Image: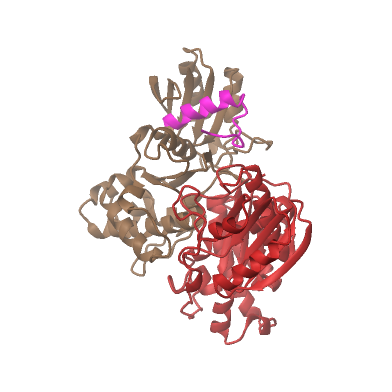
Chain colours: A brown, B red
Amino acid sequence: MYGAIEAGGTKFVCAVGDESGTIIDRVKIPTTVPEETMAEVIAFFKKYELDAIGIGSFGPVDVNPESETYGMITSTPKLAWRHFPFVQAMKDAFPVPIGFNTDVNAAALGEAVHGAAKGLDSCLYITVGTGIGAGAVVQGRLLQGLSHPEMGHILVRRHPDDEYQGKCPYHGDCLEGLAAGPAIEERWGEKGINLVDRMEVWDLEGYYIAQALMQYILILSPKRIILGGGVMNQKQVFSSINKYLQEFISGYVTLPNLTEYIVSPGLGDNAGITGSLLLAHQALRDKGTGSLSRRDK
Amino acid sequence: MYGAIEAGGTKFVCAVGDESGTIIDRVKIPTTVPEETMAEVIAFFKKYELDAIGIGSFGPVDVNPESETYGMITSTPKLAWRHFPFVQAMKDAFPVPIGFNTDVNAAALGEAVHGAAKGLDSCLYITVGTGIGAGAVVQGRLLQGLSHPEMGHILVRRHPDDEYQGKCPYHGDCLEGLAAGPAIEERWGEKGINLVDRMEVWDLEGYYIAQALMQYILILSPKRIILGGGVMNQKQVFSSINKYLQEFISGYVTLPNLTEYIVSPGLGDNAGITGSLLLAHQALRDKGTGSLSRRDK
């Protein structure tokens, strides 16, 4: 039996289940300060006899097992959580193997094993919500190099009619700065949920996301692209993405039918927690290092 | 003993050697039409008793062993080579395992095993010359998904003072269209080699390459970046790249010292042929499928 944590900036979802994605208990805990939130997390898991724990965390996080700060949340704007030793805190409470990765990598793993990319050894999972993040499975393993990817902050070309300055504190008008939920709200003066009928909103959104997908495709060549997050609940964005992506790629790369290639999460909102269960499973198999240098599937 | 082919659009370099990169014989053959070029290639290798052959080819090529067109050059603008069954042609002449990949992936592999990224399980090799191409080693294996990467064609933002329209037949002003050798020549009216003292030429070149590196870093997080190809012989481009990359990344990602992180090929012009010898070695070990789904190191 595994414990899984999907640690988000607003709430922690904790679950107990197995690597098939079956969940026998689940709780939501508000993300306040580590002392408070973690006390509740630990109390929840103490009810069970766990064999391993998997964590998919908001970040940035240090996922390099050879690093001195492995298992920590690093430079997050949420100050109370900056430099929080997440893995160590869990290890102190539970002497079991602990898998640790980003929330989006966990979701990518969940989708690759049980969701919309089941049976494929490669997929890209992107969430477009309060921020934009992405995780990738490449040749059966979660993508990792120097660190985990930070795909939400890539540069895009501005639409010539878009005068919005962008909202990213680091880059201004990078992808996240132009296309995440808060950018939509600030540009149009309303939350996206109140703009459903405004075609131009979702056309522009597709324009930016399609540029990002073009870069991801040319660089990673994923076998399937999964788009989740609150913004992607506006299904009209998908057709705008497909239109612009074809225009931008311009026949240079042969892609599968786009309606089958670019899809919604197969696991819905459960991608992250399912992936975290899989991270627990891998950690047990890999004897607790949570290392990404081992096979993930 | 292995045979290796670095198949370029202008010439084929063929070599006989081993996986340590030792080369005992080498020949250059002009790239004309397949009948002519391949006859010379085969005649060269027939002098030796080969255990396996590795091919790093110009492309696009089909590198998916499960595909019906595996081992072929696909949509190249070099019409005589379009749909040329490269692997089959070699198999017909030599009944040995054959490894097959792109020229830039071969170079990335050579650099990862014996060159500037020796000892690392991750690197990105980019060539900036007649075109722009890149190969990547990720967690010890050549990056492959739906197909091989096509990183040279990513979108970049135009410099506000750059009015050159771009030279890519597919995308106009993508990275290759703005920053490859022919674009430099057309924009400035002179070959790059005659523009060595024109600071603004190399500053602009660095501006575009730095944008590309930012995207590659945020998406792939390579442990080292190796920049080769004719344009990169202008060493002043490196300082321009480093300047702009720091400006664009804007502290969001912590990178190693850039002068150690972004480097010239350790193998010089031998990266591709050394990598092709390694492809031969892998093909023998993997029993001739040349599959990238197996470990490369």
* Horizontal side, residue A198 vs residue A268: left or right: left
Q: Nearer the viewer, residue A70 or A140?
A: A140
Q: Position of residue A85 (x, y in %)?
A: 60, 31
Rendered residue at 65%/70% (across/down): B40
Residue that sits furthest to the left in the current view: A197
Q: Which residues are magenta?
A: A273-297
Q: Position of residue B160 (x, y in %)?
A: 49, 75
Per the image, is B33 magenta?
no
Q: Is A35 situated above or below B118?
A: above
Residue B265 appearing in the image: no
Q: Nearer the viewer, residue A287 or A43?
A: A287
Per the image, is A281 magenta?
yes
Total numbered badges shown on the rendered structure: 0
Q: Position of residue B278 (x, y in %)?
A: 68, 52
Rendered residue at 49%/63% (across/down): B154
The part of the image, by quadrant, that contains residue A254 is: bottom left
Q: Is B63 situated above or below A99?
A: below
Q: Is B118 situated above or below B9?
A: above
Q: Nearer the viewer, residue B85 or A227?
A: B85
Q: Position of residue A165 (x, y in %)?
A: 41, 62
Residue A278 appearing in the image: yes
